Image (spheres, grey):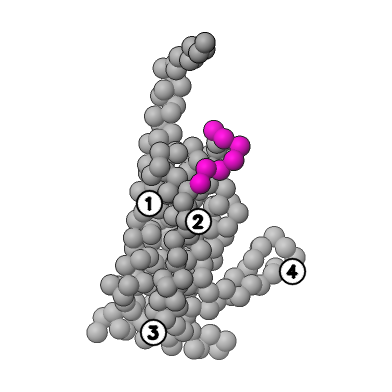
Amino acid sequence: MTEPSTPVTEAEAGLHSELEDFAQQIADQVESFLLALQAIARGETTGGHAISILLLEVSQVLLAGARLGVQTDFDTPSRYEPDAGPDPDLDEMRLRLAVLLEGVDAYTEVFDPYVDPPELAPSLLSDDLTSMASALAHGLRHFRAGRVEEALWWWQFSYVSSWGHEASGALRALQSVISHDRLDAEFESEQDQVAAADELLDAASS
C-alpha cells in the first residue's frame, strides 16, 4: 500500500520558487560567460576588445560566485551526484585562447594571501579560463536536466574549491593588462607583457 505523500505547504512552495528563480539567474550568468568565452576563442572578438570582454565576463561570473558564496550551504536530494553526462572537450578552446593571449597568458598569482610568507604560483589565463568553463558547464548540465538543487550545490562547492580562485586570479591579470595600457605603467620585470598588451589593444582600434 502506497503511503500518502506529505502535502507541500505554501511556505515550502514559495521557498522552492525563490530557489528556482535564484538558480535561473546563476544559470543565465554562467551561460553568458560560456558563450562569450567560446566566441572569443573562435576569433569573433580579437585584440584589446577581447581583453575587455574577458574582464567584463569574468567580473560578472565572479558576482554570481559571490552570490553563491554568501548563501548557506546548499544540500542535494541524493547522497551521490547524478551523472551529468560526459564533460565537453575544451582542449581546443584552451589552445585557441593560449594563441590569442600570447604574451600576456602567463602571470603570477598569490596562491593564499594569508600564508606568511605569501606563496606565489605561476598560472596561465588560458588554463584558468578553461578550467572555470569546465566547472561551470558541469553545473549547467545539472540545471538543464531539472536538478536545480544539484546545480546550485555544485556551483557553490566548485566556486569555493576551484573556479572562484581561478576567476579572481584571472580578473587581476586582465585588469593589470588594461591598467598597463591606460596608465602606461612600466615595470622592468614586466616589459614583455606590457608590450604584448599594447599590441593587443592597438589591434582593436586599427
Q: Which residue is mark 3?
A: 198
The numbered dot on residue 117 is: 4
Q: Which residue is mark 2?
A: 135
Ranked by sequence position, the earlier of labels 3 and 1 is 1
Cα gap from disc 4 to disc 2, whole angstroms:
30 Å
The numbered dot on residue 29 is: 1
**Nearer to us: label 3 or label 1:** 1
Cα gap from disc 4 to disc 3, whole angstroms:
33 Å
- Whether 48 is among the magenta residues is no
Cα gap from disc 4 to disc 1, whole angstroms:
36 Å
Prevailing secondary structure class for the magenta stretch in the rendered image = loop
Badge 1 crowding class, 10 Å Cα cut-off, few under 14, some 14 to 19, many 20 or more, is many
The region drawn magenta spans 77-83
Ranked by sequence position, the earlier of labels 4 and 3 is 4
Q: Amino acid at mark 1?
A: Gln
Q: Amino acid at mark 2?
A: Ala
